[in-house]
Image (spheres, grey):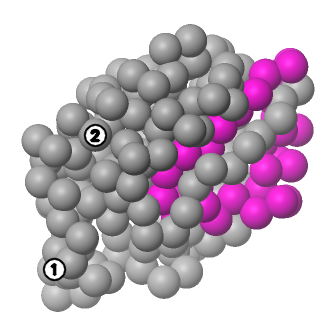
Amino acid sequence: MKTIVLFGDSMLGRFTKSRIDHLEGETVTGAVVINCAAGGWTSRDGARRAEAVARIAPDVVVLSFGANDCAPERLVDLDSFGAYLRAIAGAFPRATVLGFLPPSVVEQDGVGPRGRTNAVLASYRDVLRDIVSADRAVETDAVLAPLAASGVPTHVDGIHLTDEAYRLVITALAELVNAS
């Protein structure tokens, strides 16, 4: 049985009991998922808590940071973002570190919720992908592309995912967990 820690912002913080049960149910070896994510957190918040969370000694840690780091009112510059992510990943030396890449936001007139833009968010997504490695990252936009192409909404508020979108990304995340 694997212990999986979800660590990051609201993209993982919104893993409710049913979403955690879904992830646990799709893992081949069975799993216990512990959610250590909270809405509003930036990588700075994660770095401050990483050593404490690492005491859980998970087999797998899933990181999701960037959506808040790129928001103008919470801005963490890219160099600091990368340093914080490296510190977070370094706190889990025996765990497989996976990335849950923040999905693109819904923009209106070139701007998404709270001043985020997809162009800036993409830079933060790239840093997270580089740190965990591309083969250990859930490419949320790619996973959600079939829904978006069929006209099914993927966001409830321009940034957070719908239940249907979560079902797809949880399945993709389980595939990475199973491969780890």
Task: Locate the N terminus and report the quarter of the image it occupies.
Answer: top right
Say which residue appears at 40% left-offset and 34% top-offset: 88
Say which residue appears at 67% left-offset and 25% top-offset: 58
Mark 2 is surrounded, within 10 Å at the Cα level, by few (under 14), some (14 to 19) or many (20 or more) other residues, namely many
| Residue 39 sits inside the magenta stretch | no
62 left or right, relative to 15: left
| Residue 11 sits inside the magenta stretch | yes
Please say if 31 is above or below 117: above
The spot of residue 76 in percent (x, y) is 19, 58
Residue 110's disc is 1
Q: In front of the other: label 2 or label 1?
A: 2
The kind of residue on which mark 2 rests is: Tyr
Quarter assignment of residue 152:
bottom right
Residue toward you, 122 or 75: 75
Q: How many marks?
A: 2
Residue 84's disc is 2
Residue toward you, 7 or 147: 7
In terms of sequence position, does the residue under pointer 2 or pointer 1 come before the other? 2
What secondary structure is marked by label 2? helix
Residue 2 visible somewhere in the drawing:
yes
What secondary structure is marked by label 1? loop
Report the magenta residues as a range. 1-29
Quarter assignment of residue 165:
bottom right
Say which residue appears at 78% left-offset and 22% top-offset: 2
Say which residue appears at 58% left-offset and 18% top-offset: 95
